[in-house]
Amino acid sequence: MALLARFGLLVLNALDAFGDFVRFSGRALAWVMPGLSRRRLQPMLDQFFDVGTRSVPVVMVTGLFVGGVLAVQAADQFKAIGLIAQMGTIVNLSVLRELGPVLAAVLLAGRVGGGLTAELGTMRVTEQIDALRAMGADPIRVLVVPRFLACVLLIPVLVFYACFMGILGGYVVSVYLFGANSAEFWRNAADSVMTYDIVYGPIKSVFFGAVIALICCYKGFRCEAGAAGVGRACTEAFVASCMAILGLNLFLGMFLNTVIEMIWGLRVLLG
């Protein structure tokens, strides 16, 4: 009975925390449109610089190595069966659809999300959030909305950078290390990559950016007192963000594949 009681308490606490997160997210989303006013432009530009510009070098280096590693792992098998020319297809589709968006989002969950949690957690510990409430301002509107918009709008752009560098890394490894023909690499890539493959990753990354911002800001707002509390909040935010990204990737992939199949079927029917 004691074990069952502890398990029940754990479930109730998890449901309570999830409900609190949903309420926090709803308040943040309700302030998105009012937060786009001109007098809120400067805080958003500051967050755009922190989230976007400062993340570009890290994302580009990561994308380059992701594409290179993918080519290294696939080239030997493709070369053994005489399909080394198809490296353009496998590298481009894998990077554009899955590896680029997911790995870039996980990286940004650590780089951007950790920063958001630490910053807001420190503000909570030093009672700056309480000071905003005392002055009559809504902390969610002032602190969360600019960070949310920066993540939602700029993480798709960063994913484009990651995918571009991933394709470039895969091309360099395939052509210059494994002897694939450059012209065939790009010809097969052009034949296999469609328009929806290019926008597939950025569409998913919009949702990735939203969950990163909401989870990390929520953890910062609910941070416990002290340096240990801030560190614990950063760890929990990163783990929760990564789990949410991987779960969303599965369901968004299924949904987008279904939509693509429906569109393709309509195009066939309409001739």
Image: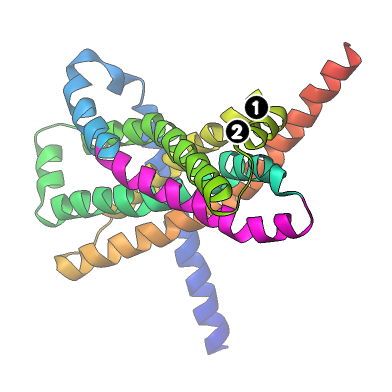
Task: Assess whether residue 68 is covered by the magenta stretch.
Answer: yes
Q: Position of residue 264 (x, y in %)?
A: 80, 24
Range of the magenta residues?
Answer: 54-82
Is residue 268 visible in the rendered structure shown here? yes
| Residue that mark 1 sits on | 196
Q: Position of residue 214 (x, y in %)?
A: 38, 44
Q: In the image, what residue type sits under mark 2?
A: Tyr
Q: Residue at x 48, y 72 (%)?
A: 10
The residue nearer to you, when weighing 36 against 5, is: 36
Q: In the image, what residue type sits under mark 1?
A: Tyr
Numbered badge on residue 200: 2
Q: Is 205 above or below relative to 31?
A: below
Identify the image quadrant of the C terminus.
Answer: top right
Residue reaching furthest bottom? 2
Q: Residue at x 59, y 46 (%)?
A: 98
Secondary structure found at label 1: helix
